[in-house]
Amino acid sequence: MSQPITVDIPHKLGRAEARQRLANGIGQLTSLIPGSAVTANRWEGDTLMFNLEALGQRVATQIEVFDDHVRATLDLPAFLAFMADKVRAALSGTGRKLLQ
């Protein structure tokens, strides 16, 4: 069974600028899970959908962009669930850096 992680990250950039920073910084999101790579990324409206591939596992990820915050949701497979707290902290830190 997978373990979803959801993190809301506030910003003061407005929707368009937040979206641009996420688009430009998607490569930095590989720090969420050591040894991972971002694959299959695409935008659906104001939602960035992508996969992180790590340790033979696929982590489905989406980041919804709002006017004053982003909501990131990662669906960790059971094999990676033990990393949930570390991934949540890394997501929050990396997201804040991208949106400053």
Image (spheres, grey):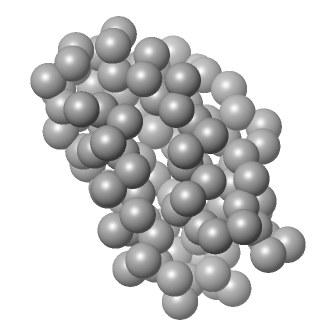
Give the residue at x 60% y 76%: 2
Task: Please state the horizontal and vertical placement of residue 30, each as a whole percent of the image.
Answer: 62, 54
Task: Please state the horizontal and vertical placement of residue 50, each as a whole percent of the image.
Answer: 66, 41
Tell me if residue 92 can be seen. yes
Which picture quadrant has residue 64? top left
Give the residue at x 34% y 68%: 89
User: Residue 96 or 60: which is nearer the viewer?
Assistant: 96
Position of 65 relative to 20 (above/below)? below
User: Residue 23 or 47: which is nearer the viewer?
Assistant: 23
Instruction: Point out the image quarter for the N terminus.
Output: bottom right
- The residue at the far top in this view is 16
In the image, 70: left or right of 78?
left
Give the residue at x 40% y 57%: 91
Task: Please state the horizontal and vertical placement of residue 88, each as a whole percent of the image.
Answer: 38, 67
Position of 76 relative to 52 (above/below)? below
Task: Please state the horizontal and vertical placement of residue 14, each as a whole percent of the image.
Answer: 22, 14
Instruction: Point out the image quarter for the C terminus.
Output: top left
